[in-house]
Amino acid sequence: MDAVSESLTELSGALEEIEGSPEGLVTLSLLETVSIPENPSGPGLLTHLGLGAAGGLVVGIGSVLLRHSLDTRIHRPVEVSDITDLPVITAPHEVKNQRRSRVAAVHRREAFAALEAHLRFTRTEQGQVLLLTNPVNGKEASAAVLDLAAASVAAGRRTVVVDADAPHSRTSRRLDLGSRPGLTDVLAGSTTTDQVLVCRPGSFDVLPAGNSPAHHDPGTNWEQALSDLARTYELLIIDAPPVPAGTEILKAGQLVQATVVVAEAGSTDRGQLLATVERLRGYAHTSVGVLLLQPNSGPDAYQPGDFSGGRRQAASW
């Protein structure tokens, strides 16, 4: 500050020495002595923390609301009922490690036992034919097929699983059946169901996917294969490819009495599920329901007796 004061004094003297300038052109006077502050000036630490917390809260809430508005996935059974009037039954996701998740494994077995019991009411004079499909990915559908077949065997019903998802053959791979003749070979007319059927004493039998190229138009051989199996087994469970490929089976398989669409909470898109359901509604010979697989814990986890999730009861399936 002293250096600034001296500079102003020198400037004032220089101005007054200019020739022709009036006297007293510049007058300087000291009004107040300025002291150097001992502490920094500005908002304190608490103010900065408060503003940061408030700003972070606003951004966080905005992000959550934006994500929620843009999220089109299904998370709860009631969301299925909001877009369709189909019956809904819930079950936990596939349990990878049953030793660590024994409770979840028990809940999943109970859920599929309940599903098997409800579907049993639609059986006919011949064996019941059931088709499981998925809007996009068939992994969970294949796991559901095997668990439902196990529940049917536990209930004393003679059961066969038909692996109709030839491009992936997930059911055959899960059972370590390897590469062998199966359904596609039957549809091609090169063999019969009796020759390629895999019998598993004490469990369900399996008709593998096969080695021949997949037939998108199964034709009469497909219906004949179902008819032959229906005369021998009480329950036929078809592991079908995702829609629309799965609907090709319904075109030929007039014996299919019920179709289960397997959806995954937190993964299946509402639009995809609705499109799948609407496509399946075109086949009057089959009833349609939704199996929603949910996390193994949380408020929406499976509870014994929770067979609706919305407006219609699964008993009407």
Image (cartoon, rainbow, N blue to C red):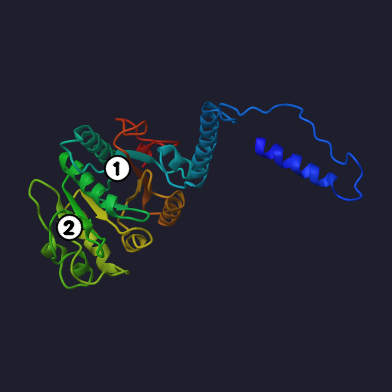
Q: Residue 285 vs residue 11: left or right?
A: left
Residue 208 at least partly seen = yes
Q: Which residue is mark 2?
A: 173
Q: Which residue is mark 1?
A: 119
The reply to whether residue 126 is in sight is: no
Q: Nearer the viewer, residue 265 or 237?
A: 265
Instruction: Report the label total.
Output: 2
Q: Position of residue 222 (x, y in %)?
A: 26, 65
58 horizontally vs 13: left or right: left
How far across and down, in percent of the image, does residue 168 sit? 25, 62
Q: Point out the image quarter for the N terminus.
A: top right
Circle 2: element type: helix
- Inspect the image, locate mark 1, and give the three-letter code of the amino acid beneath it: Leu
x and y percent of residue 282 in the render? 43, 57
Q: Secondary structure at mark 1?
A: helix
Tell me the crowding category of disc 2: few under 14, some 14 to 19, or many 20 or more residues within 10 angstroms, Cα based.
Answer: few
Q: Disc 2 residue type? A: Arg
Q: Nearer the viewer, residue 111 or 227?
A: 111
